[in-house]
Image: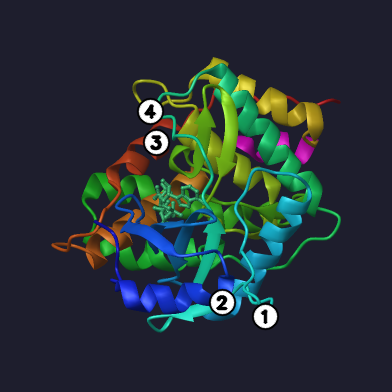
């Protein structure tokens, strides 16, 4: 299971006291995460999730907290840092940056339908609309330059078939970098996968795990989302679900002509990002008791996105 930092009950009780949320009733590590240590925490005054940040610079934490405050204030179903009696949302536990957030209700959906996808598209448009006029700047640590550098480092260790897939994909990123960076920007979740969204029935009740959030091209965020939510049985794009997601998004934030043109490229860029990060994680955590996502899923998706039949809806 992926709790990288174990926490003892006395340590947790000391940490929780300044929140004044009553006695600690129960807590347990959450196996599902791959990047941070998470715990469900039951207190007399409610249910919470404690996160210890394991990756990335601690200087970025105020960005995540500020972004969640903006989205929470705009009534989106996101967690936010609960403040202690001194007003601190970001604290420290076991030497790691730590925050306590409300536990959101609902369950992850593995096999989404059109309605689920439409709600996801709508929420993503709301996030972009709520932030694009006052973007909170954060450069992603897994951006285009990171893809080019890590891709080059990983290439010698790949099979000939993998290298034949990755090499032109990296070339494409290099060739389109300026155009991509010129696309309309906002704050992005940048990891809007099925395992970061909760539903009750077809009602979206929560979007979590903002630790990859950043500022950047909105189209990149949408490509990441479509690549996970709208898959058919061979990892190609399921057209009805993709149309539901993109249609709901575009009803709130119409796409531009430049976005429509770069759409197929962006779907491939979004595959490269997760193929590489998963390859790196698989190497780093090999043999350890840590949940690892299968890198080959994104290798297959990248192969499937060489031809893209799905057009982005946009008004001329
Ligand atoms: N605020 C929350 N409310 C309810 N459940 C939560 C909340 N935060 C986290 N969880 C649960 O904990 C699990 C792991 O959390 P999260 O996705 O943030 O971890 P992670 O290590 O960043 O994982 P990954 O990056 O692989 O998605 C989630 O799948 C969800 O089940
Ligand atoms: N959602 C990511 C893990 C967290 O960034 C993946 O599936 O590779």
Of mark 4 and mark 1, the one earlier in the sequence is: 1
Stretch of the chain drawn in magenta: 257-264
Question: Does residue 147 appear anywhere in the picture?
Answer: yes
Give the residue number, with chain letter if any, for mark 1. Answer: 86
In the image, what residue occupies the spot 62% across and 20% down?
Answer: 243
Of mark 3 and mark 4, the one earlier in the sequence is: 4
Q: Do the residues labelled 3 and 4 touch (CB within 8 Å)?
A: yes
Q: Quadrant of residue 2?
A: bottom left
Give the residue number, with chain letter if any, for mark 2. Answer: 18
Query: What colouring does the structure picture have?
Result: rainbow
Instruction: Please rate how many residues cluster around mark 4, counting C-alpha atoms within 10 Å: few if below 14, some from 14 to 19, many from 20.
Output: some
Give the residue number, with chain letter if any, for mark 3. Answer: 301
Instruction: Please rate how many residues cluster around mark 3, counting C-alpha atoms within 10 Å: few if below 14, some from 14 to 19, many from 20.
Output: many
Of mark 1 and mark 3, the one earlier in the sequence is: 1
Q: Distance between the residues labelled 2 and 1?
A: 8 Å
Label annotation for residue 235: 4
Q: How far apart are marks 2 and 3 (CA)?
A: 47 Å
Of mark 2 and mark 3, the one earlier in the sequence is: 2
In the image, what residue occupies the spot 25% across and 67% down?
Answer: 284
In the shown orientation, is residue 278 left or right of residue 115?
Answer: left
Q: How far apart are marks 3 and 4 (CA)?
A: 6 Å
Q: Nearer the viewer, mark 4 or mark 2?
A: 2
């Amino acid at each position: 299971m992926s709790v990288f930092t174990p926490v003892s009950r006395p340590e947790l009780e000391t940490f929780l006291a300044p929140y004044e949320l009553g006695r600690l009733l129960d807590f347990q590590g959450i196996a599902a995460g791959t990047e941070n240590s998470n715990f469900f925490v039951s207190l007399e005054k409610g249910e919470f999730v404690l996160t210890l940040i394991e990756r990335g610079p601690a200087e970025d934490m105020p960005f995540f907290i500020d972004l969640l405050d903006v989205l929470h204030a705009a009534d989106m179903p996101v967690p936010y840092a609960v403040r202690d009696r001194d007003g601190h949302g970001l604290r420290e536990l076991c030497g790691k940056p730590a925050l306590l957030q409300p536990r959101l209700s609902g369950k992850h959906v593995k096999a989404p339908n059109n309605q689920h996808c439409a709600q996801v598209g709508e929420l993503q448009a709301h996030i972009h609309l709520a932030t694009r006029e006052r973007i909170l700047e954060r450069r992603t640590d897994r951006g285009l330059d990171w893809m080019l550098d890590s891709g080059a480092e990983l290439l010698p260790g790949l099979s000939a078939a993998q290298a034949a897939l990755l090499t032109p994909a990296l070339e494409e990123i290099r060739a389109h970098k300026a155009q991509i960076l010129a696309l309309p920007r906002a704050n992005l979740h940048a990891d809007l996968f099925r395992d970061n969204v909760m539903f009750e029935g077809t009602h979206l009740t929560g979007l979590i795990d903002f630790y990859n959030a950043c500022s950047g091209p909105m189209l990149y965020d949408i490509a990441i989302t479509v690549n996970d939510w709208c898959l058919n049985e061979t990892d190609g794009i399921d057209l009805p679900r993709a149309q539901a997601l993109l249609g709901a998004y575009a009803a709130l934030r119409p796409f531009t002509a430049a976005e429509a043109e770069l759409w197929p490229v962006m779907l491939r860029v979004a595959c490269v990002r997760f193929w590489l990060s998963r390859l790196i994680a698989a190497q780093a955590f090999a043999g350890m008791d840590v949940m690892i996502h299968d890198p080959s899923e994104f290798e297959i998706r990248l192969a499937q996105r060489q031809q893209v039949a799905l057009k982005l809806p946009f008004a001329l």
